[in-house]
Amino acid sequence: MEVRDLGSCAGVTHLILRNGRCVLSYSDGWADLKLRTKFGPGTICRLHGATKALVCASFLTLVERREVNLDDPVSKYIRFSERVASGSGKAGRAVKVKPTLRHLVTMTAGLRYTDCPAYRSIIADVRRGKIADLAAFCDALAEVPLQSEPGTVYEYSFCTDVLGRICEVASGQSLEQFVRDRLLDPLGMKDTHFKLPEHKRRRVAALYQCKAVSAAKRGRGQPYKPVLWDHPDSAPGICSSGGGMLSYKDHGMWGTARDYARFCQMLLDGGRAPGTGRQVLRAATVRSCWNDGLAPFANRRGHVGNWNVDDTEGPPWEGGSWDRCGWSPLSTLLQLCGPLRGGGAPARRAHTMGVGGGGGVYWLADARRRLVALSFQQSFEGARPEDDGRGPPGNDCVDLAIQAVDEGAQ
């Protein structure tokens, strides 16, 4: 309906796996309207924020092989600020706790994102091309005081980009090659790249903005119209493990729903690659990814600054309170089992994890239901309310997949 009747989505692929087997593969619409290229499970999409989980999983191979330790200070590997902003001047004050690799994987290292005023000159240099690679970007960040004391505040930020640079330094490889050797090749993710080979560009989906069309102009036509989306700002030279630097024109990694499903299934299978059974991540490492990474930083009430805030839109899946959610070392959202625990208590375990990318890719892995659900599209906007009488929105298969499993179990 989104594609054919509404125009609120240019094209989409849904994949659902249950107990390791594909039970639904459905695609509709167009990867490229002009070229009339159909959308499918092999369509190459911008992963944007969904890049983070792939880089974090690759980083964890360094941890399990004892090439790095999560409690190592970031400054052991690269230049990194150990001062925090204060009202006493631009230089700030010394941190009370040195920022560590654990702070990076949990987004508690004191960094912020592009819109942070303290980063204004850095972002300007990125736009001008003066900062043109990941090493130079991280060096520039090191000159700016942290925006909060490490371990006190969760902030979705450049932490994963810095983690990508740690991977390069610790391994002696480029980030592209490191992720390929540690994760992509062992998993058989052949179409996932930071730098897309030229011969695969014909399979790339265009990025669309689905604009609303007024009733007067559309007549009996579709209420939305997909138009090509573009942005003047990009940083193509920076290999962004966070999924992009300046705008959604920066893609992070490229990938397909078919490839990403292999990663998701690996998370349900104790680190083993689908089909081959190859051990990509140790079972203990994968188990740690299902535990709330924010637990070590919780206060007596079990809260972490900027996380347990329920005056914003509630969490996905089960809804309710953010007290029921956590953050995985994979930089993914977790739906946790059991009530909130006070600081110092063992971390709660999750039954579901997932995350999305700004351009329209989304995935979920549900350990309780042995379920993987992915929806990949490349469209902005076009959203419609679920109670408009047209049924569930067709750009997300997660709710339908969960409902089908639960009804089948009755």
Image: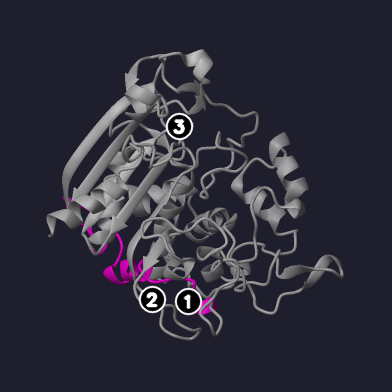
Regarding residue 103, the answer to whether it shows in the image is yes
Regarding residue 186, the answer to whether it shows in the image is no
User: Which residue is rendered at x = 61% and y = 34% of the image?
Assistant: 234
Distance from disc 3 to disc 1, alpha carbons, whole Å, reads: 35 Å
Question: Closer to the N terminus: mark 2 or mark 3?
Answer: 2
Q: Which residues are magenta?
A: 270-297
Question: Closer to the N terminus: mark 2 or mark 1?
Answer: 1
- The reply to whether discs 3 and 1 touch (Cβ–Cβ < 8 Å) is no
The N terminus: image quadrant? top left
User: Which residue is rendered at x = 46% and y = 44% of the image?
Assistant: 357
Q: Position of residue 262 (x, y in %)?
A: 26, 48
Q: Closer to the camera, 269 or 357?
A: 357
Distance from disc 2 to disc 3, alpha carbons, whole Å, reads: 35 Å
Q: Callout 2, which amino acid?
A: Arg
Residue underneath mark 3: 379
Q: Position of residue 306 (x, y in %)?
A: 60, 66
Task: Identify the element where label 3 is drawn.
Answer: strand
Residue underneath mark 2: 348
